Amino acid sequence: MTSLTSHLPLHLPHPDVRRLADAAHAAGAKIHAAVEPHEHHECTRYEFLEDALLAREMGRL
């Protein structure tokens, strides 16, 4: 069986596109860190919840 896409040329994005995307991602992460400085995951605020859930899951195994 032959591939239907074997005759199509491989198209890769220009390297500058990747560079711009990385810069935009870094800028977005920096802005997010400045706007949301007190964001915490529930398990880091309530360690006992993680321990209780783990104990319950281990009991099921």
Image (cartoon, helix red, strand yellow):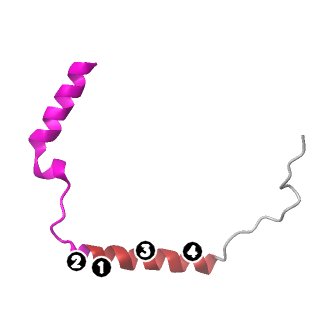
Mark pair 3, 2: CA separation: 15 Å
Magenta stretch in the rendered image: 33-61
- Indicate which disc, 4 or 2, sits on the residue closer to the N terminus: 4
Mark pair 2, 1: CA separation: 6 Å
- Indicate which disc, 3 or 2, sits on the residue closer to the N terminus: 3
Residue 26 image position (x, y, % from top left) = 39, 75
Tell me the number on the disc at residue 31.
1
Tell me the number on the disc at residue 25.
3
Instruction: State the residue position of label 2.
Output: 35
Q: Are marks 4 and 3 in contact (CB under 8 Å)?
A: no
Please identify the quarter of the rendering in which residue 9 is found: bottom right
Tell me the number on the disc at residue 18.
4
Q: Amino acid at mark 3?
A: His
Q: Are marks 2 and 1 in contact (CB under 8 Å)?
A: yes
Look at 38% across and 79% down and name the residue there.
Answer: 27
Mark pair 4, 1: CA separation: 20 Å
* 21 lies left or right of 61: right
Q: Are marks 1 and 3 in contact (CB under 8 Å)?
A: no
Residue 38 image position (x, y, % from top left) = 15, 67
Q: Secondary structure at mark 3?
A: helix
Residue 46 falls within the magenta-colored stretch: yes
Quarter of the image containing the C terminus?
Answer: top left
Mark pair 4, 3: CA separation: 10 Å
Q: Amino acid at mark 2?
A: Val
Q: Amino acid at mark 1?
A: Ile
Count numbered badges in the picture: 4
